[in-house]
Amino acid sequence: MNAPTALVFAVLALILTGPVPAMLSRATWPHRTPRAALVLWQAIALAAVLSAFSSGLAIASQLLVPGPDGRPTTAPTAEIDALGLPLWILYVTVLAITLVIGARLVWATSLVAIKTRRRRARHRTLVDILDRSAGETSAHGTDVRVLESLDPIAYCLPGLRQRVVVSEGTLSNLDDDELAAILTHERSHLRARHDLVLEAFMAVNQAFPHVVRSRSALGSVQLLVELLADDSAVRVTGPRPLARALVACSGSSAPRGALAAGGPSTLVRVRRLATPGSTPGVATLAYLASAAILVVPTIYVAVPWLTELTRLARHGS
């Protein structure tokens, strides 16, 4: 791998963390095909991480300049003599930035996972203590907990001990179909483990430097998982009961780490329910784009590295 390869991957990483998420977040077609759009978002995020690391690895390979015997040297003085001090400093700086991003990604992933699970565990214990369902739990499911509040509230707590939390106001203000829609929506989040998708995007968002990362990626993915849960509810109750339930719970909030039925995206979601329809052609293109974003850079980086490993193996033997 050479310096142009490193530059290509560096530019690709910057594009995938800045302009591409910004453009995709402004598009409306993902609302019609949320599953395909979510796959595309995941492919973009993963390709951005891989491109950043590939750029650093390509630079690292330039530091291993061939010695007199043809084997790569790891002596800094020999590398400086071969590359020149300015170029050597540039390569080392880029490699250091890549290592920092990698360390930040590992740290952010661990931090998000630990804090989120601790927060959920505390809140799960709290809702179990404050549960007002009494004998009504069996009617709605053993995972349902009812809070004493006149405001309609609905959210879920993912994890090994999952909970769907509603309020007394939710039970009294929603009819049977509306309540079924809300419960199906929340259980869809739990079943699909949308929380893990959101955690991954939170970690990537924190790992990349503030000047290059996109602020819109996480918000777009949060909307998409809500749309997917809405689609699950629509298949059970139809769009109208879900729309009425979403409006009723639009003012509800949820603790950090939970997934609420209402929120700032309610208006967009209700409008979407009023104009149902899918675009399979667009979904197919999104899946193809996802594959291309991942496969092409992977091949581009794998072939040179396999060639380099083969060369080193020959010299080593």
Image: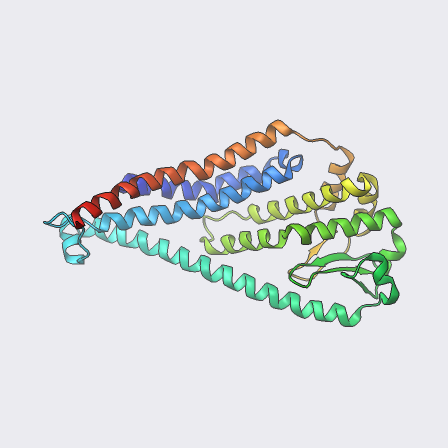
User: 262 above or below 107?
Assistant: above
Q: Position of residue 92 (x, y in %)?
A: 27, 54
Farthest top residue in view: 281
Q: Quadrant of residue 238?
A: top right
Q: Position of residue 28 (x, y in %)?
A: 64, 34
| Quadrant occupied by the N terminus | top left
Instruction: Name the residue at 41% across, 36% down.
Output: 296
* Residue 185 visible: yes
The residue sitting at the bottom extreme is 129
- Point 63% across, 53% down: residue: 193
Q: Nearer the viewer, residue 258 or 207?
A: 258
Residue sitting farthest toward the front? 317
Residue 125, how many percent across, how many down? 71, 71
Colour scheme shown: rainbow
Among the 4 quarters of the image, the one containing residue 234: top right
Q: Is residue 150 visible?
A: no
49 shown above or below 33: below
Coordinates of residue 4 in the picture (x, y in percent): 29, 39
Foreground pick, 107 / 307: 307
